[in-house]
Image: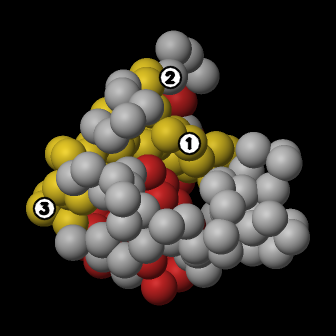
Amino acid sequence: MGRGHDSGLTHLGADGSARMVDVGGKAESERVARAEALVRMSVATASAVASGDAPKGDLVATARLAGIAAAKRAGELIPLAHPLPLTYCDVEVVIDPAAGLIRVRAEARCVGRTGVEMEAMTAASVAALTIYDMVKAIERGVVIEQVGLTHKSGGKSGSWERSAW
């Protein structure tokens, strides 16, 4: 089986069909990925969250745990992602009430043959979805504005850092 279809996409076989990338020949290295999600809401909702008045309880702790649990299951959720033995995962939730913004930062690490970008982005995404779930009784118009990779290191391609959003 080849490295991928002529498109350069590694998840496409020579015939153009989706496939899991064969990482068996790659060297193991420490892999790190960080991702962020931005959750936009009204100032009143963000203020309620910051003061601990979310209707479903401790939003920060619940979102953190949901994100960490999701990162551990990224290989099950993303069809062509490899299941990875994470060595570390954490999620940080930063509330800016004056801006009506909650910033979710996730980091995932492993020692392996493929990166942990999907784990970090899954953690940030599910934590953001958990925040929405926990505040929807106050405000249905909450928006998850963006989810994206902010840093990756390890492996053949080395390090990458997002310059700005």
Marks 1 and 3, how far apart at CA: 21 Å
State the mark number for residue 125. none
Q: Which residue is mark 3?
A: 87
Instruction: Identify which residue is drawn at 43% across, 43% down.
Output: 35
Q: Is residue 143 left or right of residue 97?
A: right
Q: Which residue is mark 2?
A: 162
Marks 2 and 3, how far apart at CA: 23 Å
Mark 1 against mark 3, which lies toward the viewer? 3
| Element carrying mark 3 | strand
Residue 146 visible in image:
yes
Residues 40 and 107: in front is: 107
Residues 36 and 155: in front is: 155
Mark before the other along the chain sequence, 2 or 1: 1
Instruction: Identify which residue is drawn at 38% across, 35% down.
Output: 156
| Element carrying mark 1 | strand
Q: Which residue is mark 1?
A: 148
When asked about the image quadrant of residue 100, the answer is top right
123 w.r.t. 39: above or below: below
